[in-house]
Amino acid sequence: MIPIRSRILDVGVRAVFHTFLLLSLFLLFRGHNQPGGGFSGGLVAGAAFVLLWVARGPAALRFLYVAPETIAASGLCVAVATGIASLFAGGQFLESGSAVVDVAVLGEVKFFSVLAFDIGVYLVVLGFVTVALQRLGTDLPDDPSAS
Amino acid sequence: MVAATAPIAYRFLGRYALLWCASAPLAAFVWLLTQTPGVLDGHPVAESLEWLPQLGLDVGLRLDAFALLMALLVTGIGVLVFVYAYGYFEDHEEPALTSFTAWLTLFAGSMLGLVLADEVFTLFVFWELTSITSFFLIGFHHEQGSARGAARQAFLVTGLGGLALLGGLVLLAQEAGTTSISEIVTAPPATNGIVVAGLVLLLVGAFTKSAQAPFHFWLPSAMVAPTPVSGYLHSATMVKAGIYLIARFAPAFADVGIWRPLVLTVGLVTMTLGALRALFAHDLKQLLAFSTISQLGFLTVLFGAGSPELAEAACLMLLAHAIAKAALFMVVGVIDHQAHTRDLRALSGLGRRLPALAVVATIAAGSMAGVGPFIGFIGKEQAFNGLLDAHFDGSIAVLAVVVVASCLTFAYALRFLWGAFATKSNVDAGHHRVGSEVARPNVLFVAPAAVLGGACLLFGLAPGTVEHLIAQATRAIQADAVTHTLSVVPHLGTAFGLSLVVITSGVVLFAWRHALDRLRRRTPRLPSSAGGYEVAIRGLNRVADRVTGFVQHGSLPVYISVVLLTFIVAPGSVLLVRNTLADDVAFVATPMQAAVGALIVGAAIAAAISRRRFAAVIALGAVGYGIAVMWVLEGAPDLAIAQLLVETLSVVVFVLVLRRLPSHFKAPHRGQVARLVLAGLVGTMMTGFVLVSTGARVVPPISNELVERSLEDGGGRNVVNVILVDFRGYDTLGEITVLVVAGLGIASLVLAGRARRGRSDERTRDAEMVEDDQLEGAP
């Protein structure tokens, strides 16, 4: 049961893939004040890859550029590093802080340390979804692309 | 910190990385020296870092004179050991050396932390860290079974001791009402059963770490470690951790309950036993290992007695033993490296070939045996004097045993020198004679041992150099301790007489070594504690096998049934007892709810009765989406988003897995009715549970407060997100960790399956069919 790879599906997915990724980032960054957050964002990004996987098969994961495990692990590292950073900033482990930074185009943007933590969550979730895709999706004995 | 850089440094510096890492203990050593005047004037340096203030846990460090003595030993010998390791290892051992260097540096750091710790939990953490690093260092030759076994043995023994220690420290800290060691010791809690139990546990920890009988057996096994490790961890520093602990607690608790009898008995038995075993060892390193055990026993006696007369002698012996034993281990390492054997039955004529090494060894062995003019002599003299002056019960009996053990010590020191360096006329049959033709070692290889040998001599000839340090260290552990002016010129008296007795009988014992050897062969072997360890480990494995076989028999339906049954029985019985339903339950609030509810129920029924797996999964997905719609209706967009996405992805994952399974469920079979009953019970139970639990609230919900604080403390308007990443950050961190682990689990399970398949391609189909049959049982 290899998914049927059709031209139409491929073009269609290509059209929405980047939109999905943008949407996931949108969810991630708005999460602090509106519905969304790292968890939902990560899931949407994962769903983008699932779509791509449906259209292209295992080759879809090449768009990740790094191993899914690495993504998950680096997400965990980011989250822990955020916690430790707040130790150095004189707070408790994982205590949140904020800073207002003047960004060129967007004007003043308020950054929260929890955003970094949320990015960690995002990466972990994305990594998990893609790990599952890669491991469960690519090694069928009758799948020609399996190595 | 430097340990982290070690692997990188190794890549660039090769073997020189060892020298780079020597800079860490060197820096610490120099820093300690700069602190010395202040500390010796009675101003301990203390530092405290908040760790978990909610639990009242701090990282407390305190540098008083006794800690300074230990820390100087740890760092000073540490520097020398790194230099020595540089000469000991060959370049071709590179890959293993990278981690070795890191572990050794990490050990030096942990050991330093241990002696500086003033807070019981800090102490425990460092204590365990030394056990762990020791495990990796003993297992350096991890390709050898014996090294792995020895590492595991050492780790289990010291690790279990560590747990006992933790228990003891917790009990003592609870009773004393403080976690600071210096405060516990200055104001010891009143004696009661809990304090005694705490002390016994603490002693068990100390005994395992310091290789006291009956836990001594791990130390000789640990000698499979490279010699720098043996010299550093297993003679000079780590094994002193237990002694250190005893030294800290003895003055305050020596009169409590069974402390003194227990410590003195264990110490004396260890001292004698170790010395006897050392007298008969053929391997030079084993000889030193047993000698270390014996000397540790001696230190346990001296410190453990907690007597003001003995404290100074104990500190002196601590210093003397660490220096001398590290030097001796280094000498053995050189011999091993150059002659490729440590068997004293094979070595002959080495003294003439390597005279400098022989001189160093003689000084160190002399110091260990307690002859002048070395530091060990002064220490032993003080010890005899102290025991003569001490007035706790049985001090004279203790003295007698100590003298006997000292005779043995003298004899095996002689045997060590003779065995390593003498030119023997008749090398035992069956041993290839090694000695006169060995290559001369590198200067840098011998220099560390020579420095330590020089220290034995210097401190012996001019004890004034260390007198102030020793006196202050003594007072740091025991304020009322008696301190003396140290001198190498013997004071003519009983103690000197005893020294002479020791030397004479030591020589006699050595001369009669063949007769003694024959005598030993005729005496039956006592049951050894190492044997006990073996039995215990085997028994544990058997029990673990059985338990695993019983609990994990591999049937998924049974696992699920057990989980569900537990769910029914445990909370279900509570439900039966208090069945007050929530009073304002509206079963259907809006028409939309009814519609979505009907959809969910319909999809659930479809999932249950579907014969095709694929259809069942889609139906399950529909249930999930229905619930997501429910969230939207109830005004919980965050939950709805998450639910929708999770549902989508789990359907995808299900489909991925389904590709490996037959497309249809098997025809109904016998278990069906039981499953129906179980499912019905769980459904009923869940409904009842929801109804009752919504009515069971007695305190106002926490959500109000969270909503209020969200914008103010968390700085966000999305309460759910603020809770996730801020208020409950720890939880989320734990959850994503689980997620990562689960991901890695999937990866490795599939990889393992693939490897198995790759190995038996022709059996693939059969194997898959078997797997299918097994999975088929899953509902």
Image (spheres, rainbow, N blue to C red):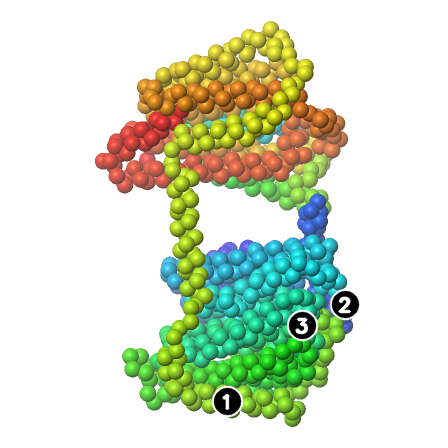
Is label 1 in a helix, a strand or a loop? helix
Q: Secondary structure at mark 3?
A: loop
Where is the C terminus of chain B found, in terms of image quarters?
A: top left
The amino acid type found where label 1 is placed reads Ser
Which residue sits furthest bottom? B492
Q: Which residue is mark 2?
A: B43
Residue named by callout 3: B306
Q: Earlier in the sequence, mark 3 or mark 1?
A: 3
Residue designated by label 1: B505
Residue A129's x, y, as percent? Answer: 48, 30
Q: Name the one closer to the observer, B30 or B235.
A: B235
User: Mark 1 or mark 2: which comes first in sequence?
Assistant: 2
Circles 1 and 2 in contact, beta carbons < 8 Å: no
Front-lying residue, B462 or B123:
B123
Q: Residue at x 36, y 16 (%)?
A: B611
Q: Is residue B352 above or below residue B292?
A: below
Q: Locate residue B503, reporting x and y percent.
A: 53, 89
Nearest the eye: B359 or B582: B582
- Give the residue at the far front of this rendering: B577
**Badge 2 density bin: few <14, some 14–19, many ≥20, Cα 10 Å:** some
Amino acid bearing label 2: His
The chain that hosts pointer 2 is B
Q: Are marks 2 and 3 on the same chain?
A: yes
Q: Is residue B226 above or below residue B271?
A: above
